[in-house]
Image (cartoon, rainbow, N blue to C red):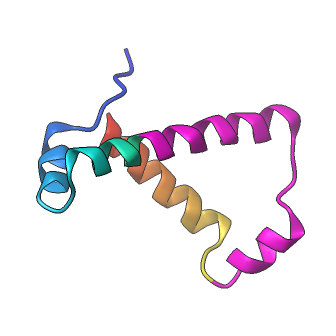
Amino acid sequence: MVRRKIADQTRLALERHFSTAQIMDMIAIQGMYVILGAMIETWGLALDDAVAKRIGDITNREDFEDAAARFAKALL
């Protein structure tokens, strides 16, 4: 069974730097990106050229997917 929550250790670390409201915002933002990802995958949507150009200098697909996987793991 997959549990959808921030691990206690991660939550405690976050609480040293962020308020409960800010942590709730992080969870909501992450959830919105999960929904967006599902929509992109479902309909095979391409990344907008303007967005690709803006982010091309700061990340790549491999680094992004690695960061996303680590973040998702922290939520379990």
* Residue at the (21%, 57%) spot, across then down: 18
Question: Could you tell me which quadrant the N terminus lies in?
Answer: top left
Q: Vertical placement of 54 versus 30: above or below?
A: below
Farthest front residue? 21
Q: Is residue 55 left or right of residue 22?
A: right
Is 63 contained in the magenta span?
A: no
Tally of marks: 0
Question: Could you tell me which quadrant the C terminus lies in?
Answer: top left
* Residue at the (66%, 64%) spot, across then down: 61
- In front here: 21 or 14? 21
- In front here: 65 or 33? 33
* Residue at the (14%, 55%) spot, across then down: 13
Q: Is residue 55 left or right of residue 16?
A: right
Q: Vertical placement of 52 versus 75: above or below?
A: below
Is 56 contained in the magenta span?
A: yes
Identify the magenta region. 28-57
Q: State the predominant SS element of the stretch in magenta.
A: helix
Location of residue 56 by image quarter: bottom right
Farthest bottom residue? 57
Q: Is residue 16 left or right of residue 31?
A: left
Place of residue 58 in the rendered image (x, y in percent of width and height, measured from the top left): 60, 81
Place of residue 3 in the rendered image (x, y in percent of width and height, measured from the top left): 34, 23
Place of residue 39 in the rendered image (x, y in percent of width and height, measured from the top left): 76, 35
- In front here: 39 or 41? 39
Place of residue 64 in the rendered image (x, y in percent of width and height, measured from the top left): 57, 62
Q: Vertical placement of 3 versus 68: above or below?
A: above
* Residue at the (73%, 78%) spot, across then down: 54
